[in-house]
Amino acid sequence: MNLQQDLFKPLMAAYSRGEPLRNDQLYKSLSIDKVIPEGALLERVPTGKDRALHNPVTRKIRWAQHSLRALGLLEKVPGERGVWRSTAKARGELTPAPRRTVLLGFSTKLGLALWGDCADVFKGFNEPIHCCLTSPPYCIDRPRAYGGIAESLYVDFICRAMEPIVKNLVAGGTIALNITQDVFLKGLPARSLTPERVVIALHEKLGLYKVDSLVWSNASKAPGPIAWASKERVLLNTGYEPIYIFSNDPSRMFASNQRVLQPHTERHLKLIAKGGENRTGVYGDGANKIYPGSFGAPTEGRIPRNVLQFGGRCHSQTEVRRFAKEQGLPVHGATFPLALAKFLIEYLTRPGDTMVDNFAGWFTGPLAAELTGRRWLASERMLQYVEGARRRFMGFAGYSDAHLLPEWES
Ligand SMILES: C[S@@+](CC[C@H](N)C(=O)[O-])C[C@H]1O[C@@H](n2cnc3c(N)ncnc32)[C@H](O)[C@@H]1O
């Protein structure tokens, strides 16, 4: 029997509550749980060069403790002898960056991932930004693991977070802001107007123009709002989230639908091939007119509509989830599908432009930037998400990381 490895599970179980445990307490609890055979703690055998008498079981336990420490799962309580506890990583907890502390998580030739509060990362920032694609924490009743923002503070929170970015946004640059519409008035099947207030505040306080309100339609979205759709049955299930597009100068926007053209339908290709319509029609009280030859001009593709269909899950998310689980890191519960982020980045920026994400999560937006040759800078407040995300960037040119977690083994 390999007692040392067999000890990993019971040891982690003993420390699972996160409280420090003295070794004598640990031995006792392992005996009670029959992990250690009865009487084994009393045994003494000559060990090592000096043949001093030691207990072989407690020696194995201490070896197991050190192995678990090397894996970043256990740590010694500083200043105390023989007292250990599980690490935040082992408990799947999230470690927020202390205020005014910004550390490099990892970097590539194109970008920098920073562990820090966005207020600290972007304070004093002074580089041109072409686009910000971000999905801040929501103001929801039951916040995600990484927390939420009280509704009364939400508008100010968003304005403060966006201010340094807007200050550095080049003329015609854009901000793509994804916030939920599922915030309800207390006890009512009525949606809060906070998202609308955010839009108005970004216009009035930061001078941004609302260019579009894209509909991100997600057919795999979990059913909800449970209270009002499944239980009271007065509302429909939510099928989309808004992504607001803002610009500081819409007359100079360099967003281009030509970078995200979709293939024409067979029907449209046939129409082009025969030189377009051969009829005349007037629709919508004259707003739309069709003439012979309409829609006959060959074009490279179809201009996408502002309803974007992207399922919530994708291969890239599955991979990073697997990595996080293997490493004992918490799984992020609110990420973009990579294809959506890629679509937005390609639509809103040109190769070589700089995008930022101040609420980066698992860095899906920055990953899209990396894959499409844009420069990027992103901040995330929770250490474990930065650590999970870095796996997604390992193969890229110039990848380097700072191993933020203590005694991290990749
Ligand atoms: C909705 S998630 C973003 C997910 C991301 N779009 C993705 O696809 O991976 C919001 C993230 O903002 C982070 N966050 C919250 N407050 C923050 C702050 N003040 N500064 C930086 N990050 C913050 C949270 O920890 C969370 O990971």
Image (cartoon, rainbow, N blue to C red):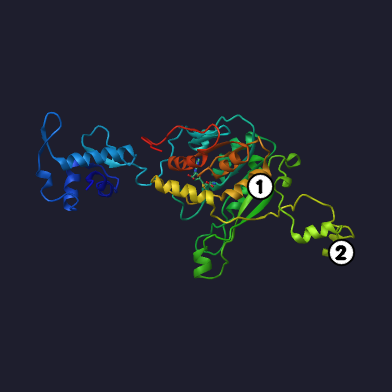
Left or right of 409, for residue 295:
right
Q: Is residue 201 above or below residue 98?
A: below
Q: Judge: label 2 CB < 8 Å from ligand 1.
A: no
> Residue 343, how many percent across, how many down?
64, 48
Q: Which mark is residue 282?
A: 2
> Residue 382, how many percent across, how many down?
45, 41
Q: Secondary structure at mark 1?
A: strand
Quadrant location, the C terminus: top left
Left or right of 211, for residue 45:
left
> Residue 308, how many percent across, how many down?
65, 55
Q: Which mark is residue 93?
A: none
For this rendering, which residue is in front, 2 or 183? Answer: 2
**Looking at the picture, which amino acid does disc 1 mark?**
Ile
User: How crowded is the residue under tag 1: few (<14 C-alpha within 10 Å), some, or many (20+)?
Assistant: many
Q: Residue at the location (51% across, 70% down)?
A: 232
Q: Secondary structure at mark 2?
A: strand
Left or right of 78, for residue 132:
right
Badge 2 or badge 1: first in the primary sequence: 1
Q: Is residue 9 visible?
A: yes
Residue hosting label 1: 245
Q: Nearer the viewer, mark 2 or mark 1?
A: 2
CA–CA distance between discs 2 and 1?
Answer: 32 Å
Q: Residue at the location (43% across, 46% down)?
A: 324
Query: Do the residues bearing badges 2 and 1 touch, measured as CB atoms within 8 Å?
Result: no
